[in-house]
Amino acid sequence: MRVLVTGGAGFIGSHFVKRLVAQGDEVVVLDKLTYAGNPANLEGTGVELVVGDIADPETVKRAGSGCAAIVNFAAETHVDRSILGPKEFVHTDVLGTMTLLEWARSTRARYVQVSTDEVYGDLEAGGRAVETDPLRPSSPYSAAKAGGDLQVLAYVRTYGVAASITRGANTFGPNQYPEKLVPLFVTNALDGEPLPVYGDGKQVREWLHAEDHCAGVDLVLREGAPGEIYNIGGEDHENLEVTYRILELTGADASLIRHVEDRAGHDRRYAIDDTKLRNLGWKPAHSFGEGGLPETVEWYRGNRAWWEPIKSGEYRRYYEEQYAERLQA
Ligand code: NAD
Ligand code: TYD
């Protein structure tokens, strides 16, 4: 099958491209190559890369030519950046999604929207979110993703677009841009730099390996039903637990930990029920602390040539804005 993978030069999208190529699918990547997009993530795949914006209909039409399906990974994805400036998030995650849906409407292509468990918001009181729960996003990022999800459901109902939605948990693995918790703390620990833990560090996230995330999305692409939503879960861990495991695996000292000013509107706990996807046959292959995280740390240890150039330029400016005052306080 010829598949259009948007955001395929990013973290999870590039793992998905590699999976499809290994399976013999034909892939076209459409990616704007924002700060998070990196052609190096696609090295050796031989796939066609169209550089452009998913919110531009002509570009989408050109990239999607001959594709029977589209899987949309393209998004602005980092909560902290959305707090600093939400506009790009609405542009890509809402308007971009709508533009792709228009293309799917006109071509009758199968559509999968890669969304996030963050649309359910905070589950501090306990329980796990199921797919029919109301959306209660807390951050500009999750609000934009929720807006994208609602566009998808409207296009299914109004125009009969054959679209499904996946809602994955916090994802980790090789090739993740070093701004999110795991790659930021691993690379900082390897460099002897501070690990800025927001607030008390007792927030809980579910951790899902990128390859398991992609296996779930692929299953939904092939066997999911239009109009249906599928949660893709992981393993529950507190941020401090993750931090101490990273220190252990990198051999860094606990004195690197700094409790800094909390994130505005910080969700305490995410938790999802993924029974629906498991009933379709999905099961994760990677554990977090035992297999997935040690392998991920080894990947960052062995691939400085991938992340050291990133940690200069634009990244430096973002890092200063996000952390300089917090770390001085
Ligand atoms: P990422 O930030 O690593 O990559 C996003 C990619 O999208 C980049 O290659 C970027 O260049 C591209 N992009 C951004 N705006 C674009 C635009 N307007 N047009 C075309 N391309 C554009 O993101 P990721 O972590 O790989 O996340 C991929 C998807 O999975 C996102 O939709 C995200 O919401 C979702 N998701 C991520 C996680 C996670 O923990 N990382 C968890 C659940 C769901
Ligand atoms: P992150 O990786 O940004 O994912 P998300 O906010 O989308 O869940 O953050 C994961 C958790 O780690 C979240 O509770 C915020 C926390 N965190 C820190 O404590 N310090 C940091 O520098 C970052 C980036 C995150």
Image (spheres, rainbow, N blue to C red):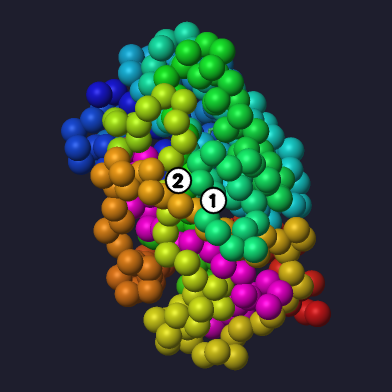
Q: Are marks 1 and 2 in contact (CB under 8 Å)?
A: yes
Q: Please, is residue 86 above or below residue 55 in the view?
A: below
Left or right of residue 75: residue 174: left
Callout 1 secondary element: loop
The percent coordinates of residue 309 (x first, y second) are: 50, 60
Residue 231 — which label? 2
The range drawn in magenta is 192-218
Q: Is residue 14 visible?
A: no
Q: Quadrant of residue 22?
A: top left
Query: Does the segment drawn in magenta span residue 130?
Result: no
Residue highlighted by disc 1: 129
User: Crowdedness of circle 1 by 10 Å Cα count: few (<14), some, many (20+)?
Assistant: many
Whole-angstrom CA distance, mark 1 to mark 2, is 9 Å
Residue 202: quadrant of the picture? bottom right
Q: Judge the density around disc 2: few (<14), some (14-19), many (≥20) Cα neighbours within 10 Å.
A: many
Along the viewing direction, whichever of 66 and 259 lies nearer the viewer: 259
Q: Is mark 2 within 8 Å of ligand 1?
A: no
Identified at 29% across, 23% down, the residue is 2
Give the residue type that dot 1 points to. Answer: Ala
